[in-house]
Image (cartoon, grey):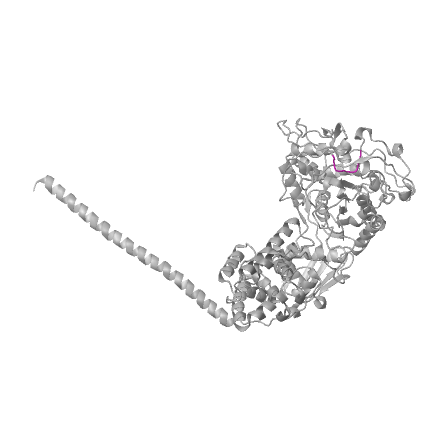
Amino acid sequence: MGRAEERRARQRGGRRAAARRSSRAAGKSGIRRFFGIKKIIGAFFGLCLLGMLAFVVLYMVIDIPKGNAEAQQQSNVYKYSDGKTTLARSGGDGVNRQNVDLAEIDKDVRNTFVAAENMTFYEDAGVDLRGTARGLLNTLSGKGKQGGSTITQQYVKNYYLTSDQTISRKLKELVISLKVDREKTKDEILAGYINTSYYGRGASGIQAAAQAYYRKNAKDLDVAEGAYLAALLQAPSQYDWAVASDTSKKLVKDRWNYVLDNMVKMKWLDAGERADMKFPVPKEPQGTPGLEGQTGYLVEAANSELAEHLVDQGSAADLEEAKAIVDKGGWTVTLNIDKKKQTQLEKAVKDTLTSKLDPEKRDVDGDVQAGAVSVDPKTGKVLAMYGGVDYTEHFRNNATRSDYQPASTFKPVILAAAVDEDAETQEGQPITANTVYDGDSKRPVVDASGNEVGFAPPNEDDVDYGDVTVQEAMNASVNSVFAQMGVDVGMEKVMEVASALGMDVEDEQAVPAQTLGSMGASPLEMAGVYATLDNHGEKVTPAVIASAEHKDRTVEIPDPIGEQVISREAADTVTSVLTGVVDDGTARQSVRENPARNGQQVAGKTGTSDDNKSAWFAGYTPNLVTTVGLFGEDSKTHAQVTLQGATGTLPGKGRVAGGSFPARIWAQYTFGAMGEVTEFDLETKQGAAVQPSETPTVEESPSESPSESPTTEEPTQSPSQSPSQEPTSEAPTDEVSSTPPSTLPTESETEETPPDDGGDEWWQDEEQ
C-alpha cells in the first residue's frame, strides 16, 4: 500500500472514529437531557404532593371557629385633642344591623346577590380555586385586593375571620369555606352573607341597608332595589348615589344592569319584565343619632383618614374594605380637633353667614353650603373643621368635598412654581414680585417661540390693567398675567408643584386654562397647600387623627410634616406677596380693616369661580392656616348653582365673592383663635411685598363704613369647556377693584354709606 493510500485510510478511520465518538456523546447527552427532564417532572410532582399533604394537614388542623359577627361589633369612641373629652360614640349597641331570615326576603331579591357575586353559588363547593390563587399571588406581589371569591368565602371572611391581607388568613378562608359549605345549606350561607355584608351609610346587613337607602324593610324590597343593594357591595361608599360622582353613578348603573342581565341569563327574571325596569334612585341619607351638627362631619373625616392608613399599612386591600373594618367598631380614635377652636369656627360661620340666610325669603339662600378647615402649619394638625349646617341634614362634608373649583386661590401655586424653578418671562427677565407683565384683558398667551397658544382669558369687566407688577397682579387677581406666567414657567412644572404642595391633580391636563383654578379641590386640600407655604416649603399633610387604638390592630399615624417640596425662598416669596392681597388687594375690607386684627400679619388669597358657583378665602398667620369655601348646591338636585344674591345684603349684583363672606368668616375665627400677635419669618430676596396704600388701623369704630368700590373676579373654565377652547367674554369673578392698580382709589376717596339692610356691619363688602 502506497503512502498516499495509507494516509487516506487513516483519514477514513479517523472520521469513522470521530463519528462514533460523536454518536456516543450525543447519546449520552440525550440521556442526560432525559434524566434532567425526569428530575424536573419529579420535583414538580413532589411539590404538588407536598402541597396536597400540607393542605390535608391544614384541613385537619383548622376548625370552623365560633362566629358571632354581631357580638364582635363594638363602639368606636372619638375624643377631642385633649384625649379626655368624648366627641362621639358610634357602633356597639347602636350598630345599624338587624338579622333577617332568608325566608322573609323575596326569592328574586335573594337571587340578585347571587347574580352579582357568584352565579355558580348553588353548584360550587364553596371556593373558587382560581380566584383564590389569584388572590394569593396578588397578596404576595402587593397588588392588593383579591378577586373571584365566592359568596361562601366572603361570608366566612365577614363572619369568622378578619380582612387582613395575609397568606395565612387566605388559607384559613379557603379551608373554612370548604368545611362551611359541607356543614351548612346554601340558604344558610346566603342568609349569613347578606346579613353580615357592609352596604355603606353605616349599614351592616340587608335590613339596615333597606332602611338606609329605601326607608323600607328588607322583606318589602323589589327586584330593582335588591339589584342596587347587590351592586352596592362592590364599592359602597363610591356607589352611594347621594355622594357619587358622575363617573361613579355611571359605574353603579352599569353594575345594576349587569346584575339584572345575569338574572335573565340564569332564567330567574323574565326578559320583558327586565326591559321595563327603571333604576331605583335611593333616598337621601338620614343622620345617625348622636352625629348631629358638626359631630358627624368630624367622625366621617376621622373614619376616612383611618381607612386610608389601614390601606397604606396593608391591613385592608382597598378603601371599601378598610371602611368596613372601621365601622365594625372597637376603635378609640383621638382627633387633633381642639374643642375651643372648633366652637370658635362654628360660631364664626353662624354669626357671619348662616344666621343671615333665609331660604323662605330667597330660594338661593337654601343653596348655600359652607366648608372650612383650620390647620397648625408647624404640626399639620387639623384644629377645627366645619362640614356644613348639620350632618343629619346635609350628608356631604363640605370641608372634604373636592368637586368645586378653587379659582384664584390657585394663583399662588403658579408664583411658587415660577420662583422655585427660577423661571423667566418671554423677554428673559426673572419672575419676581416686581416683574412687570402686560395685564390687558384678553391678551393672547404666547409660548417661548412667541406663538399664540390659543388661550386669551378676559379680566373681570374686561378691564385692561396695562403694565403691572406681579405683586399688583396678585393683589388685583389679574387673569391675563397669571395665564402668561403659567406658560412662562411651563404648565407641566406648575402642575408638578401643585401636586407637591398637596393638590390632587393626577388626572388633570397641564394646559393654560388650569391657571384659572378650573380643577376641583377641597378646603382640606387647599389648607394643606397654604400650610406648606406657611411652613417655608416643607410639606404639610393636614391630619385629622392624632391616634387610633384597637385591641386587634396597631395603626401607625404618619408624621404630617414631610420633606422640603419647594425651596424656602419660593414659599416665603409667595407669603410675602400674599400679604399684599390682604393689605392692598381683594381682602382688604374683610381682613385688613377688622378691628380684632390688632396688627397681626396676614397672608391670603381670595377666589370666586365661574358663574359664582364657589367663593373662597385661604389665609394664614405664622401659626394658623384656615381655608373657607362657599359652594352653590341646589338643595334638591345637588347640582352646582350660583351663589349670587344670597342673603340679599350685598350691594351691586349681589355677587358672593371670596372677599365677602369667606373672608369675613376667616377673619372672625382667626383673630379670635390665633393667640398672641406674631410676624412672619421670611427669607426672600424679593422684599416684603408692596406697601399698602394706607397703614391698617384698629381704632376704627364698628359703626364706621369702609370703602366700597366696584370689583372684578377672574374667570375659571367650566368643567364642560375643553381646555383648548377660547374662554367666553363673560369672565367669572374675583374680588378686586375694576380700576387698574396704578390708579386704585384710596379708602378715603371711595368711602360710602352702606345700604340700610347692612349698615350696622363694619365690614360691608367693597367688591360688589
Q: Position of residue 390 (x, y in %)?
A: 78, 56
- Residue 314 appears in the rendering: no
Relative to the observer, which residue lies in front, 74 or 26?
74
- Which residue occupies 42% across, 65% down? 49
Segment tinted magenta in the rendering: 730-737
Q: Quadrant of the C terminus?
A: top right
Q: How many marks?
A: 0
8 inside magenta stretch: no
- Which residue occupies 80% across, 32% down? 738
Residue 188 placement, left or right of 208: left
Q: Quadrant of residue 30?
A: bottom left
Relative to the observer, which residue lies in front, 286 or 489?
286
- Residue 567 appears in the rendering: yes
Q: Position of residue 306 (x, y in %)?
A: 67, 57
Residue 276 placement, left or right of 40: right
Relative to the observer, which residue lies in front, 143 or 637?
637
Could you tell me what secondary structure mostly forms the magenta stretch? loop
Q: Residue furthest left?
A: 1
Q: Quadrant of the N terminus?
A: top left
Q: Position of residue 565 (x, y in %)?
A: 65, 43
Q: Quadrant of residue 699?
A: top right
